[in-house]
Each structure stands twice: as C-alpha cells, then as structure tokens.
Image: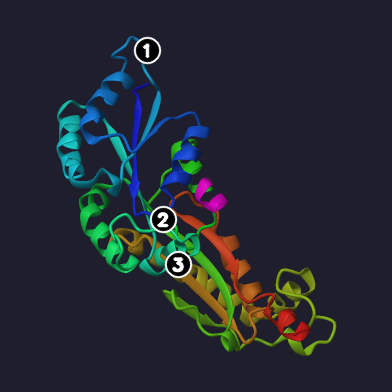
Amino acid sequence: MPTRFVIVTGMSGAGKSTALKVLEDAGYFCVDNLPIPLIDKLVTLALGGNGSRMERVALGVDIRSGEALPELQEVLERLGISGIRHEILFLDASDEILIKRYKETRRLHPLSGTGRVETGIVRERAALAFLKKQADYIIDTSQLLTRELKQELEKIFVRGSSFKNLMITVLSFGFKYGIPVDSDLVFDVRFLPNPYYIEQLRPLSGNDAPVRDYVMGFETARIFVEKLTDMIRFLIPNYIEEGKNQLVISVGCTGGKHRSVTLANELYGRLKDSDAYGIRIEHRDIEKDAVRKRM
C-alpha cells in the first residue's frame, strides 16, 4: 500500500490543530508548520529514504509559512510529476464564526497585526485561495462541534468513506426567537397542530415520544416529511456539483420546542445514512421557554 500523504491546511481558527490531533491519534505521523523548503525531505523520508517507509503522514501548512507559502505550489507540482499522490484537506469557517472564535480566545490573527481581525481574515483567504481550489476535501466547521469534526475526519481518513465536501446541518428553531441568520433553506411547520396547547405535552419536547407520536400522527405531517425529504435528496447532489460546502436546513415552529424539533428529527433520520456528505442536527431553541419561565 502506498504512503498516504495528507496536507492539512485552511483558515486560522477553523480547526487545523484539532484535525492534526485526530489524525495523530489515528496513526498518522504528523508534522505541523514545517518550513516549505523542507517538505521534499519529509516526503523522501516518508517514502522510505532511510530504509523505513511511513504508511500515513499528515503535514500542517498554513499562513504561518509567510512569504514562503506560494512556494508550496511548486512543491505540489513536483510531487505530481514524481507520481507521489497527495491529498489536501482544507478547513474553513465563515468570517463571522472566525471573528467570534478569535474574540473568545483573545488571540491575534497572524495577518492582522495591531489592526482588525477582519482585515487579517480577508488577507488570509486571498493567500490560501490556491490551496482551497486544489483541495480534495473541504470541511466547513462553522456549525461543527469538536466531536463532530472528529467523526467526519475519521470517516475520510480512517474508514476511507467517500466525502463530497458538503456538511449539512438540520436545525430546529422558534420563529419568536428569530430565523437563524445562516439558514440556506427555511421551512415553516406552524401549519401543524401545536402540542403546546395540550397540557400533558406542553412541558415535553419533540425529542420525547408522546410529542413525536402526536405530531406524526397527523397525515399532513407525514406527507410533509416525505415531500421535504424527496426535495432535499434532489437538491444535495446539485449543491455538491455547485461546490457548496455547507447547507443549513432550518425547520421552524412558534417556540422551537415541539413541532420543529419533531420534524427536524424526522428529516435527519431519513438523511443520516449516507457517506456522500456529513450531517448533524441541532435544536437551537428547545430549552429557551424553560429559561424564560425561570426568569
């Protein structure tokens, strides 16, 4: 089996350090921030230049390479000419999320200096554009928890599953708390009977069987889920072909606790068994009514 050589790159704050830790735990020999001129030597070593070949190697490369970063293109071209297969994993996130992460950690962006984080992010995107264009895998971590990123990386680099660079988030929400700003598709399920008005169901949520059974007991709900699932399955390959990396499907009801949670769970359950994309579920407002009542 030939050496698997993975270049881990992407935006600062998007999860490269986490990715390298996951790959190291999976048995990859990992090197982070190696000077660009030394990559050829690492490749020679990995291929058995010292008599011992490495099966799996991961190399972290990012904006910290500074002015030498454009030289990476020449390195990649030499690898291609030599017939040495390499894979590029590009970790990305929205500008808003990256700014939020930097502010939470109080770190300085490597390209912002004493200026604004936003300025550094714009410069970094421009500098890394050539790598993103060539990437074999693009994972948008804007909506991902660390464990969810780990699951996606294991799917690709441990189990060898196919991956089409699309991460889907099925998100339930309450309209009274606002439509999620990062939504790509929004579906309003307030046309369904509301369990809130049934006293024994009011304190429960769509994660509880009695609420689920009540909502899905209506033929309208069952037909809606089937038609919605059919449409999403039609859209997914088209989004993948377009090059979309993240798809947020938002399902809303009044408070985000009963109907939207139930329907989001139903949609997720129908879409989750596929290796063609990553998928996660989130219930944004499921606890908010309880918090408001305590206040």
At x 38%, y 65%, the residue is 94
- Which mark sits nearer the N-terminus, 3 or 2? 2
For mark 3, what is the residue? 100
Say which mark, if any, is on residue 61.
none
Question: Where does label 1 land, which residue?
Answer: 52
Q: From this viewpoint, is residue 176 visible?
A: yes
Structural crowding at the residue carrying mark 3, measured as other residues with C-alpha within 10 Å and reported as few (<14), some (14–19) or many (≥20): some
Magenta part of the chain: 146-150
Q: Which amino acid does label 3 sit on?
A: Lys
Depth check: give the residue in front, 150 or 11.
11
Colour approach in the figure: rainbow
- Labels 3 & 1 near each other (Cβ < 8 A): no
The location of residue 227, given as percent across then percent down, is 51, 74
| Left or right: where 225 falls relative to 158 | right
Q: Earlier in the sequence, mark 2 or mark 1?
A: 2
Locate the N terminus by quadrant. top left
Residue 84 lies within the magenta run:
no
Percent x, y of residue 138: 35, 52
Report crowding for label 2: few under 14, some 14 to 19, many 20 or more residues within 10 A (C-alpha). Answer: many
Q: Distance between the residues labelled 3 and 1?
A: 44 Å
> Where is residue 287 drawn, in percent x and y?
69, 75
x 80%, y 79%: residue: 203
* Quadrant of the rendering where the C terminus is positioned: bottom right
Across and down, in percent, residue 120 comes to 29, 62
Residue 6 is left or right of residue 271, and the answer is left
Q: Mark 2 points at which residue?
A: 13
- Which residue lies most toward the front here? 114
Mark 3 and mark 2: span between their CA atoms? 10 Å
Identity of the amino acid at label 2?
Answer: Gly
